[in-house]
Image: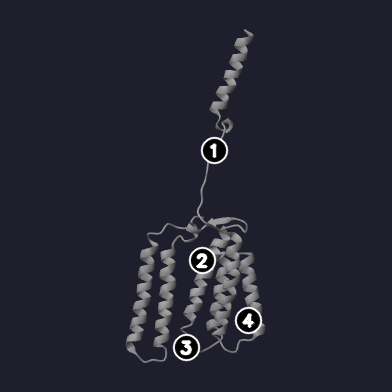
Amino acid sequence: MIRNAWTERVWARLKLHLADPARRPLPEVTVETGPTVRGWVLRAALLVLVPLLVLTAASRTPGLSTALVWPTVALCTGLVVLRPTPTTAGGVVVVSGVLVWGFTAEPFDPWSLLVALLAYLVVRLTWWAAHVPFGGRAEVAALLTGWRRDVVVLGGTGLLGGLAMLASGATVPGAVLLAALAVAGIAFVALATGSDQAPPAR
C-alpha cells in the first residue's frame, strides 16, 4: 500500500508537470542575426545630420545673425539626439523651412531641394533612433527596409534640384514642363515601389 501510494503521488506530479506548460523545461533555441548597428551609432549620425540640415538651410538666407543660427543649431540637435521622436524631427524640418523661406523675399532657391533631401534623411534616421535603444542593436537588413523607395525619393530630389539649377535664370518654356514631368515621375515611381515594400518592423 505504501508503495502504491508513493507511485500514485509521483504519477500525479508527473501528469501535472506534463499538463502545465509553465512546468515543462524550455527548449534550447539558437538565434542568428546578420550584421547589426548599435543605437548609439544612429544617434551619432543624427548628431552630424541635424546640424548639417539647419546650417544648410540657414546658409541660403543671407543676413542671418550667428547669434540666431548657432543657438538654433544647438537646440535642434539636442532635442533630436536626446529625444528622437517624430515631433522633434518634424520641428527641426519646420525650423529649417522657416530659415530657408521665412526671412527672404527672393524667388525659389534650387538649393532648397538639398535641404529637403537632408530633411528626409533626418526624419528616417530619427524614426529608427526612436525604436532602437541607445545600447540596443538593429540589423542592417532591417535598416535597409524600403531602400528602393528611399533611393527613388533621394535620387529624384537630386535630379529635380539639378534641373531647377539648370533652368534658373533661363527663359526656356520647356524647362517648366520638364520639371513638372520630373515631379510627376518621381511621385509615380515612389508609389509603385512603396506598394511592394514590407513596412519596417515596429
Q: Which residue is mark 2?
A: 124
Q: Which residue is mark 4?
A: 69
Q: Give x and y (percent) for residue 52.
A: 57, 76
First reached walking from the N terminus: tag 1 or tag 2:
1
Which residue is at a point 47% across and 79% down the rendered structure image? 113
Report the amino acid beneath label 2.
Answer: Arg
Q: Give x and y (percent) for residue 154.
A: 44, 72
Q: Are marks 3 and 4 in contact (CB under 8 Å)?
A: no
Note whether 153 is above or below 134 in the view shown: below
Q: What secondary structure is marked by label 3?
A: loop
Which residue is at a point 60% across and 55% down the rendered structure image? 136
First reached walking from the N terminus: tag 4 or tag 1:
1
Measure the C-alpha gap from mark 1 to mark 2.
36 Å
Q: What secondary structure is marked by label 2?
A: helix
Does residue 80 appear to the left or right of 31 in the view shown?
right
First reached walking from the N terminus: tag 3 or tag 4:
4
Measure the C-alpha gap from mark 3 to mark 4.
22 Å
Residue 84 in sight? no
First reached walking from the N terminus: tag 1 or tag 3:
1
The disc placed on residue 28 is 1
Measure the C-alpha gap from mark 4 to mark 1.
56 Å
First reached walking from the N terminus: tag 4 or tag 2:
4
Q: Give x and y (percent) for residue 126.
A: 55, 65
